[in-house]
Amino acid sequence: MRKYIYIIVSLLLLTVAASVEAHAGNDVSGKNLCFVYIAHSENTSVNALSKYIDARYQRALDTDDFVLVLYLANGTDPLIVKVNTEDDNRNDIKELERELKEKYSHKVDAGYDLKRIVGLFEELDFMVPYSSKLKYEAVDWHFHVTSDFWAYGYNESLISSLCFVMGTENLKEENFRFRCYFSQYDELVYDKEKPFGAKNYSNIDFRPYFY
């Protein structure tokens, strides 16, 4: 699995710069981007998660300057809801909520998710080409995970790899904010010294939050 992820990371690094340059004309300055990744299992507190989603979704409806992307992992067929983007599909929020309430869990495919999320950030015009500067006023990454997520090593194969590919370690803390959420009824076991595995990110103060 790790070798497979390394191959994906290498290929993504070769394509990110050219793709970002292709979107160089988009103006997203002054806007905030909130990306929410959801790993859903039997340990997810669906009611609490739904309240979190509703609050972010309502904020996006209230202001055009708040760009929201909700990503429900589901193998190679994730459910993605975008608000205030060029390809806005805000009405799909009902399908996402139904999936969470009616299904027991959804599969995480770390390799696929890595490629798909990097592609999403390229489409959203995440950074200034060939630099370590965000185009957005601020960017939030919120990962809603469970104990299974860490147990399977997705903290390293997905989160750490994503940070590496997107060059987040060079971003200022006040502009890039990372948070990891999990249910208060679950237990997240992680290495406090190396929460993402072999590589650490100095601009991420890793502290799990309850949702």
Image (tube, helix red, strand yellow):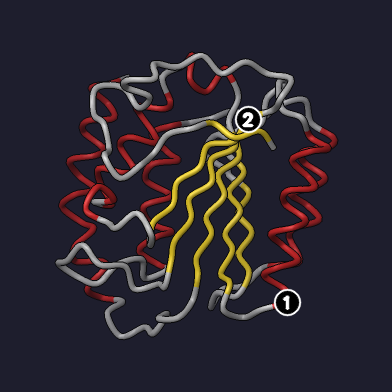
Q: Residue at x 24, y 51 (%)?
A: 167
Q: Which residue is mark 2?
A: 182
| Contact check, label 1 and label 2, Cβ < 8 Å | no
Instruction: Give the amino acid at mark 1.
Output: Asp
Residue 80 image label: none
The part of the image, by quadrant, that contains residue 161 is top left
Q: Residues within 10 Å of mark 2 (few under 14, many from 20)?
A: many
Q: Residue at x 44, y 52 (%)?
A: 177
Q: Is residue 69 above or below residue 180?
A: below
The part of the image, by quadrant, that contains residue 130 is bottom left
| Disc 1 to disc 2, C-alpha distance | 26 Å
Q: Position of residue 73 (x, y in %)?
A: 58, 39
Along the horizontal axis of the image, is 112 left or right of 181?
A: left
Instruction: Give the amino acid at mark 2.
Output: Phe
Q: Is residue 3 above or below residue 180?
A: above
Q: Position of residue 34 (x, y in %)?
A: 53, 59
Q: Residue at x 69, y 37 (%)?
A: 211
**Mark 1 vs 2, N-terminal side:** 1
Q: Which residue is mark 1?
A: 62
Q: Position of residue 197 (x, y in %)?
A: 31, 22
What is the secondary structure assignment of the residue under circle 2?
strand
Along the horizontal axis of the image, is 2 left or right of 60?
A: left
